[in-house]
Image (cartoon, rainbow, N blue to C red):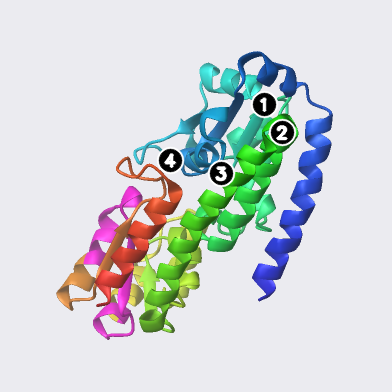
């Protein structure tokens, strides 16, 4: 409950922040000229939310839209910076995930939605906030508020699209609730903590060995002892499900997945970035929930 309360408070604070930013910007004149709001998102998972919430009233550009690109280490091009500078609404992830975008957005004359800030997640905490149902809802509200401040005449349209998006999100959460009935308390481990918010929503218990978890969180290489503790826990049956980030596979993660296969521990494979076969964040989350459900069936 503490996390949810903190997110709700942060979301309210964010609305106030958006109002102050929009008031000092000049993006509305551009919107009046071409009838659409120029939106730039650092990553496609938030870009798809922005498009769903704006429809034909917005033109959305996602700078990173491939699972082959690591947002942490991305070096923006001159074209990327130019897009951010011309945007009326900028959506960044925050929490250190896309520091390059946060930095560039600070000099832009735009309304900025920082997903992590809206969700009450600080720098140094897990930045993969799009996996959290509470954060997704808070960010959607903040994006809608941003649109309505840039183009108040279309408030009714934006409210309707927000309702439609919320219905999609509610479907995801209904699936999560169904899966939680059989996953609640189930011990899982992960090669990286990218989906820990989703696992938490489903009631899973994180049993990733602490040394390994610390190393990957700090983006350092786990020690041989860390790997042995992980593989031993798998072989001992202490871990009932393994979550694998296929964007960050290595010889070390290969040892872990081999150990899981040797004792038939079910695995869920996923990526940080939204795969190309999905056209919305909610569709991706629904697909992942289905994957978890099938893995533990």
Please, what secondary structure does the residue beneath circle 3 have?
Answer: helix
Give the residue at mark 3. Answer: 161
Give the residue at mark 2. Answer: 111
> Of all residues shown, which one is farthest toward the left?
262
Query: Circles 1 and 2: CB distance less than 8 Å?
Result: yes
- Marks 3 and 1 sit apart, C-alpha to C-alpha, by 19 Å
Give the residue at mark 1. Answer: 88
- Marks 1 and 2 sit apart, C-alpha to C-alpha, by 6 Å
Closer to viewer: mark 4 or mark 1: 1
Of the numbered discs 3 and 2, the one sitting upstream in the chain is 2
Please, what secondary structure does the residue beneath circle 2 have?
Answer: strand
- Marks 4 and 3 sit apart, C-alpha to C-alpha, by 31 Å
Give the residue at mark 4. Answer: 70
Which quadrant holds residue 209? Answer: bottom left
Give percent across and percent down for residue 5: 71, 69
Closer to viewer: mark 3 or mark 2: 3
| Location of residue 1 with respect to 276 vertically, above or below | below
- Marks 4 and 1 sit apart, C-alpha to C-alpha, by 25 Å
The residue under the point 25% across, 70% down is 294
Please, what secondary structure does the residue beneath circle 1 have?
Answer: loop
Q: Which residues are magenta?
A: 233-257
- Marks 2 and 4 sit apart, C-alpha to C-alpha, by 25 Å
Please, what secondary structure does the residue beneath circle 4 have?
Answer: loop
> Of all residues shown, which one is farthest toward the top?
33
- Would residue 7 be found to the left or right of residue 136 on screen? right
The residue under the point 35% across, 41% down is 67
- Marks 3 and 2 sit apart, C-alpha to C-alpha, by 19 Å
The residue under the point 46% across, 77% down is 203
Q: Is residue 245 magenta?
A: yes
Q: Is residue 81 magenta?
A: no
Query: Circles 4 and 1: CB distance less than 8 Å?
Result: no
């Amino acid at each position: 409950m503490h996390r949810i309360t903190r997110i709700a408070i942060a979301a309210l604070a964010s609305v106030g922040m958006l109002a102050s930013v929009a008031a000092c910007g000049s993006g509305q004149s551009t919107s009046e000229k071409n009838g659409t709001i120029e939106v730039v998102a650092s990553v496609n998972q938030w870009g798809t939310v922005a498009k769903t919430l704006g429809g034909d009233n917005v033109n959305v550009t996602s700078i990173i839209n491939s699972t082959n690109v690591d947002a942490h280490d991305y070096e923006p091009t001159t074209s990327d910076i130019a897009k951010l500078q011309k945007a009326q609404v900028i959506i960044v992830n925050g929490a250190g995930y896309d520091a390059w975008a946060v930095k560039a957005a600070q000099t832009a004359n735009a309304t900025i939605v920082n997903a992590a800030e809206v969700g009450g997640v600080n720098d140094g905490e897990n930045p993969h906030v799009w996996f959290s149902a509470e954060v997704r809802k808070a960010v959607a509200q903040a994006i809608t508020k941003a649109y309505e401040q840039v183009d108040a005449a279309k408030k009714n349209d934006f409210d309707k699209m927000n309702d439609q998006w919320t219905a999609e999100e509610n479907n995801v959460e209904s699936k999560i609730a169904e899966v939680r009935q059989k996953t609640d308390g189930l011990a899982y481990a992960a090669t990286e903590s990218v989906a820990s918010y989703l696992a938490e929503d489903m009631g899973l218990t994180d049993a990733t060995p602490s040394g390994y978890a610390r190393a990957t969180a700090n983006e350092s290489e786990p020690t041989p002892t860390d790997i042995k503790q992980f593989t031993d826990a798998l072989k001992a049956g202490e871990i009932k499900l393994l979550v694998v980030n296929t964007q960050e596979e290595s010889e070390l993660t290969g040892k872990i997945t081999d150990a899981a296969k040797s004792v038939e521990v079910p695995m869920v494979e996923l990526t940080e970035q939204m795969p190309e076969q999905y056209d919305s964040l909610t569709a991706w989350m629904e697909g992942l929930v289905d994957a978890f459900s099938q893995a533990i069936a």
